[in-house]
Amino acid sequence: MAWWEKYLTDIEFRLDEELAAHRAEYKAWCAVSLNRQQRRFYLTQVAARLASPLYGNMLTYHQAKRWIAGNLEERVHKGILERYEANKVADEAKRIEEEWAK
């Protein structure tokens, strides 16, 4: 069976393919947007599209939102905090170096 034929006739296959694509789209957006509010808004848009008649109403909006984001939002937030902490440590080290240089 050709990929397109399987995509058009096998709902589970289509859902797996679309979920992977929508998750990748959202992940790419999160990589460039550090604004939590923007990420959440974008997630609502991507989830609404996946849960729409365009994709055959294969799942609900809330299921789509949960499956697309997974724990991605938590990982992005953790990554932001880690970068913040690293910058804070670097700033403190620079301040101490400057004091010793005096």
Image (cartoon, rainbow, N blue to C red):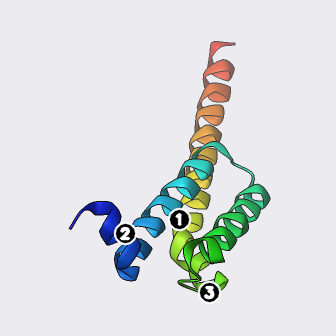
Image: 99 above or below 33: above
Image: 34 above or below 4: above
- Residue 44 visible in the picture: yes
Residue 95 picture location, percent across and down = 68, 27
- Residues under numbered marks 3 and 2 in contact, where contact means CB atoms less than 8 Å apart: no
Residue 9 picture location, percent across and down = 36, 77
Disc 2 target residue? 7
Q: Label 3 sits on what residue type?
A: Thr
Sequence-wise first label, 3 or 2:
2
Label 3 environment density (alpha carbons within 10 Å; few <14, some 14–19, many ≥20):
some
Image: 93 above or below 35: above
Extreme-top residue of the structure: 102
Label 2 environment density (alpha carbons within 10 Å; few <14, some 14–19, many ≥20):
some
Q: Label 2 sits on what residue type?
A: Tyr
Q: Residue at x 65, y 64 (%)?
A: 46
Disc 3 target residue? 60
- Cα gap from disc 3 to disc 1, whole angstroms: 19 Å
Residue 60 picture location, percent across and down = 62, 86
Among the 4 quarters of the image, the one containing residue 10: bottom left
- Cα gap from disc 3 to disc 2, whole angstroms: 20 Å
Disc 1 target residue? 72
Q: Look at discs 3 and 1 and give the one toward the viewer.
A: 3
Q: Is residue 47 left or right of residue 5?
A: right
Extreme-left residue of the structure: 1
